[in-house]
Amino acid sequence: MAKIIVTNKIFSDVENRNLVALLDVIIPANNARGLPSAAELNFLEYLEKFGADQISTIKEELEELNKAALDKTQRAFFNLEKDEQQKLCGLLREMNHRFARTILVQTLNCYYQDSRVLNAWGRKAGAQFPGGNKVPQDDLTILDPVRKRGKIFREVVEK
């Protein structure tokens, strides 16, 4: 009986290398503030858990990025110098404002949930108000002008 090898590999080697390079372009490290590069995060784990439905779109975006790099420089994106990568990304964004939008959104979501990033800003990871948030009692008469105005929305009529 043949052994079946199962891998958890989402992207090809070239896609992985291009993704890591792009993540570093999107959010480079800021050592002075103690902030990691987006490439230093476990983006693939995040993506599997929270953005699995976006993987095919991200693959398309990485393919578009690498094709542009090959067309313009005859080199893969990850083989370009950092400034060349930044210029190419800027050019692609000028030509198509939606360029790599899915990668960008998922990167930002992942980055701003990372405990190292939150700690560097003096915030705790996790819920901001895990014990709830007390709302002081206030004078609700301040809402009277809104109540007097009446409804300003349409009623939905079901057929």
Image (cartoon, rainbow, N blue to C red):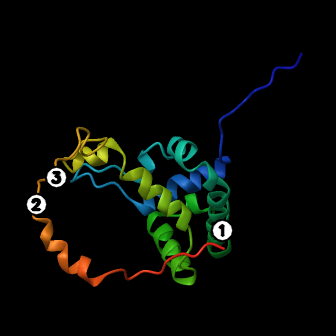
Q: Nearer the viewer, residue 159 or 117?
A: 159
- Farthest residue in the right direction? 1
Give the side of residue 68 with respect to residue 85, left or right. Answer: right
Position of residue 86 measured from the top left corner of the image (x, y, whole percent): 46, 70
Give the side of residue 26 with respect to residue 77, left or right. Answer: left
Q: How many marks?
A: 3
Q: Residue 138, which numbered label?
A: 2
Give the side of residue 108 with respect to residue 48, left or right. Answer: left
Q: Secondary structure at mark 1?
A: helix
- Farthest residue in the top direction? 1
Q: Give the residue pinned by disc 3.
A: 135
Q: Secondary structure at mark 3?
A: loop
Q: Amino acid at mark 2?
A: Asp
Q: Amino acid at mark 3?
A: Val
Q: Give the residue pinned by disc 1.
A: 64
Above or below residue 128? Residue 57 is below
Comes first in the chain, label 1 or label 2? 1
Position of residue 89 measured from the top left corner of the image (x, y, whole percent): 51, 72
For the point 42% across and 46% down, the residue is 40
For the point 65% across and 52% down, the residue is 14
